[in-house]
Image: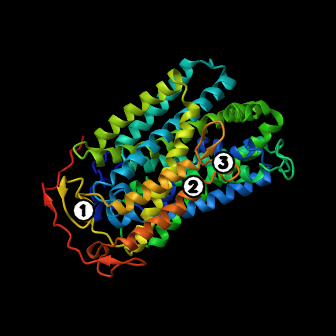
């Protein structure tokens, strides 16, 4: 990896050479935390108040969701250092060399959705703050310029690649954190931790609201699952696994800062400007500007700019990388430009022509519901393989070859694919987002959205059952053999086909 942040990164999803893997667990922390230390996370932090919870109930739901989500996410950080590639490519070991496109597809959709949310929320905050501060016209043209500014800057950073993105996040983590802390002084006089919420004692909607709020918070760390390997692949394989997992875990626990900011300010908004937290049409950014003192408008604009850059780069970088992994003839740079341009078009059409700003949040939730079972399959696959993988066999798809340990049935491992399809499909049926999306079984739990717990549990049980009932070939488990499941003495086909393809620089 180049030592200069201004030299364009040329690596795609091929295994990063050991000599170029110089990142540290701290770098993983900075990128993952920086990508969530934004206004978009503050908006998620406001949901417990929107659901009618008190401040303390909302804080409990937030902590619960964060801890559980971080525990689910942390193991996904191990694949990057181990295999030197992204998590979608690593999933070849469990879904097959063709089945790994499931991970690429999920990360592609997640990235576009969160890139859009980031640009919209940050652009709205920037324009709103500038309107209150200097009288900038609150018009579609102003919003369009703000969106274009964010999206263009993000695209440039992603084209330069990982080291430039890491540089941006080093600044963003410190700067955004300081600006959020300044909010303590801005809102301390209005903040009342005894805010009672709108649900009366004993209300039957309490538990559905509490669990729903915790699941929304949990979805934030889960959304990083498909991308974690994009950044951790630059960490040396010799790095202790506990340090890598700890960095990933703490990166999400640290987001208590923007979550707390969103929760606390939402409780103030609910008291002083309740029209902005109407569940039918919530406008957290507008409410924040309505209650903020004039001197905090500049920090709001800075948080919008810094946070938009940080979240946007972590989303779009992974998008380009995954697209180049599905279409290896595209370099990472070309794929990033192509997907970035399409995403920018979507942002403008979705905001001004189709009014999709509310729908995209629902869409992101549904995608995360499908991603969580995929993460479980990856984690259990890691455990049953004892953390052993064949790096050459993982690259079969990218090199347009055939065969190898992970070829299974014509490049598809029906065990992992079946477990994912069934668990993701069942989880979608249990989704309960009132006014947005309610699955056919969404009301079975008394209005509680249990989609994520159902998806996680079914994926775990079904995947282990299939591995036990239909053992995979002995050779996929490495020298120590399988853990928890059985294996079969079946030969695997040799790797045949074209030679490795050298990726063009641009």
**Foreground disc of the pair 2, 3:** 3
The answer to whether residue 224 of the structure is visible from this angle is no
Q: Which mark is residue 407?
A: 1
The answer for how far apart the CA atoms under marks 2 and 1 are is 30 Å
Label 2, secondary structure: give it.
helix
Label 1, secondary structure: give it.
loop
Q: How is the image coloured?
A: rainbow
Query: Where 39 sits versus 139, above or below?
Result: below
Q: Which mark is residue 105?
A: none
Circles 3, 1 touching at the beta carbon (< 8 Å)? no
Quadrant containing the N terminus is bottom left
Q: How many marks?
A: 3
Quadrant containing the C terminus is top left
Image-based side of 279 in relation to 423, left or right: right
Q: Which mark is residue 452?
A: 2
The answer for how far apart the CA atoms under marks 3 and 1 are is 41 Å
**Picture coordinates of residue 47, whole percent (x, y):** 69, 44
The answer to whether residue 105 of the structure is visible from this angle is yes
């Amino acid at each position: 990896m180049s030592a200069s942040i201004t030299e364009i990164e040329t690596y795609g999803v091929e295994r990063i050479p050991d000599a170029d893997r110089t990142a540290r667990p701290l770098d993983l922390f900075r990128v993952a935390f920086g990508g969530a230390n934004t206004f978009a996370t503050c908006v998620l932090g406001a949901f417990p108040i929107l659901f009618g919870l008190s401040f303390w109930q909302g804080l409990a739901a937030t902590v619960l969701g964060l801890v559980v989500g971080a525990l689910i996410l942390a193991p996904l950080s191990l694949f990057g250092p181990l295999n030197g590639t992204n998590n979608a490519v690593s999933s070849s070991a469990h879904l097959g060399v063709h089945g790994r496109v499931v991970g690429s597809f999920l990360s592609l959709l997640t990235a576009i959705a969160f890139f859009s949310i980031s640009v919209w929320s940050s652009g709205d905050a920037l324009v709103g703050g500038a309107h209150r501060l200097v009288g900038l016209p609150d018009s579609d043209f102003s919003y369009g310029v703000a969106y274009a500014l964010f999206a263009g800057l993000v695209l440039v950073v992603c084209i330069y690649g990982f080291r430039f993105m890491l540089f941006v996040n080093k600044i963003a983590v410190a700067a955004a954190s300081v600006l959020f802390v300044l909010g303590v002084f801005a809102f301390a006089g209005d903040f009342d931790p005894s805010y009672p919420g709108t649900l009366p004692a004993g209300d039957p909607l309490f538990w559905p609201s509490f669990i729903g709020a915790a699941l929304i918070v949990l979805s934030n760390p889960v959304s990083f699952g498909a991308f974690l390997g994009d950044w951790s692949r630059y960490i040396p394989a010799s790095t202790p696994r506990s340090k890598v997992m700890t960095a990933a875990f703490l990166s999400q626990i640290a987001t208590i800062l923007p979550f707390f900011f969103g929760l606390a300010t939402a409780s103030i908004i609910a008291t002083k400007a309740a029209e902005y937290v109407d569940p039918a049409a919530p406008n957290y950014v507008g409410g924040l500007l309505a209650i903020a003192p004039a001197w905090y408008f500049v920090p709001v604009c800075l948080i919008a700019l810094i946070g938009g850059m940080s979240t946007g780069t972590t989303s779009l970088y992974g998008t380009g990388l995954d697209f180049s992994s599905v279409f290896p003839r595209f370099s990472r740079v070309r794929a990033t430009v192509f997907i970035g341009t399409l995403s920018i078009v979507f942002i403008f059409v979705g905001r001004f022509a189709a009014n999709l700003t509310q729908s995209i949040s629902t869409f992101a939730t549904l995608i995360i519901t499908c991603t969580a079972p995929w993460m479980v399959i990856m984690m259990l696959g890691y455990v049953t393989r004892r953390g052993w993988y064949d790096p050459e066999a993982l690259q079969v798809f990218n090199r347009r070859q055939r065969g190898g340990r992970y070829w299974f049935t014509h490049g598809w491992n029906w065990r992992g694919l079946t477990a994912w399809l069934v668990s993701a499909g069942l989880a979608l049926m249990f989704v309960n987002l009132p006014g947005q999306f309610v699955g056919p079984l969404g009301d079975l739990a008394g209005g509680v959205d249990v989609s994520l717990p159902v998806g996680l549990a079914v994926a775990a049980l079904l995947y282990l059952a299939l591995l036990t009932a239909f053992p995979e070939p002995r050779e996929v488990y490495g020298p120590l053999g399988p853990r928890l499941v059985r294996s079969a003495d079946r030969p695997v086909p040799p790797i045949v086909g074209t030679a490795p393809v050298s990726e063009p620089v641009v």
